[in-house]
Image (tube, grey):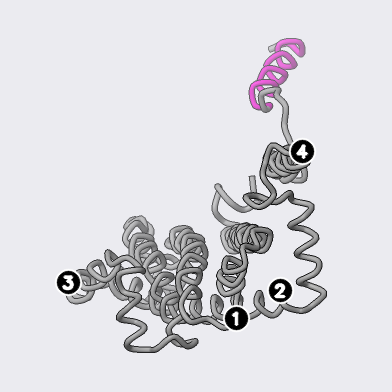
Amino acid sequence: MSVTTEFTATESRTYSSAPAPGFRLGSSGLIALSWLVPVLLLVTWEALARLGWIEPHLLPAPSKVALTAYKLTVSGTLLHDLAVSLLRAAIGFAIGGGIGFALGTLVGFSRIAEAFIDRSVQMVRAIPFLAVLPLVIVWLGVGEGQKIFLVALGVAFPIYVNTTLGIRQVDPKLVELGRVQGLNTWELIARIILPGALPSILTGVRFSLATAWLALVVAETIGAQAGLGFLALDAREFLRTDVIVLTVIIYALIGVAADSLARLLERRLLTWHPNYGDGR
């Protein structure tokens, strides 16, 4: 074979393995792009409010909401209510997430446990929050226990379902390979089964973070003396739509921050997974 032929073959292989040309955004560009629509909505909202096309008592301008946030922050009201809600959500998430993960692991590994537990869990999962709320109030009153219980109840089910599903979907060939390599039961669980189920478990965590705030909003509408839900209800009594809109925006920002934290956790814990790792 001549040198020219070799060069042509090598060049052909090089071009064939090169990525197809196209426009690519870096991680910072993708983050900026993700905020483009929210920023445009805020700008449009502000413009329509200033032009008088939106009634201030129905939907105040973003600048008015920002000014209200500043005043409530300086007075300490907003930070106190935010801290109370975050603490309730964190405690409820820890309790509900722990219970959901434990039950999901048990059911995922054992058909007997599934027959004994799963039917009852699915029946409770089908009950809406508002339907169970009066009974919870009778049991626990309207104190902190009622609010944390509702958050824990909402959080447990997504983690339970996704943990069970993740364990059941682990490739049996990997488990068999682990046995061939001489791994005992605990090593199989720690090195193959739980890492294989981790993507599904973390998906359950992301769903649970959203459900935690939904449950907390419901819980804080009854007998709360502090918290974002109490702040919104108190503002409704005085027709303070700027405060109500502020609480809605805070809920949205907390949800985005929690989801971003969960995605960061995915990238850190799933560096071995081809769909995570480098975050692309």
Q: Residues within 10 Å of mark 4 (few under 14, many from 20)?
A: some
Instruction: Identify the residue under disc 4.
Output: 47
Q: Quadrant of residue 158?
A: bottom left
Q: Earlier in the sequence, mark 1 or mark 3?
A: 3
Q: Is residue 15 found inside the magenta-colored segment of the image? A: yes
The residue that appears at 32% across and 65% down in the rendered structure is 128
Image mark for residue 122: none
Crowd tier of the residue under label 2, counting other residues whose Cα lies within 10 Å: few below 14, some 14–19, many 20 or above: many
Disc 1 element: loop
Residue 272 location, quadrant: bottom right
Amino acid on which disc 2 is placed: Leu
Q: Is residue 30 visible?
A: no
Question: From what the image shows, is residue 49 above or below residue 162?
Answer: above
Closer to the camera: disc 4 or disc 2?
4
Residue 237: x and y, percent? 57, 69
* Horizontal arrangement in the rendering, residue 15 relative to residue 143 (left or right): right
Does the rendering let one see residue 243?
Answer: yes
Circle 3 sits on which residue?
Answer: 115
Q: Which of label 4 and label 3 is nearer to you?
A: 4
- Residue beneath the point at 40% across and 74% down: 101
Per the rendered image, the range of residues in magenta is 2-18
Q: Secondary structure at mark 2?
A: helix
Which is more N-terminal, label 2 or label 3? Answer: 2
Question: Badge 1: how crowded within 10 Å, few (<14), some, or many (20+)?
Answer: some
Report the side of 62 relative to 82 (left or right).
right
Identify the amino acid type marked 1.
Ala
At label 3, the amino acid type is Ala
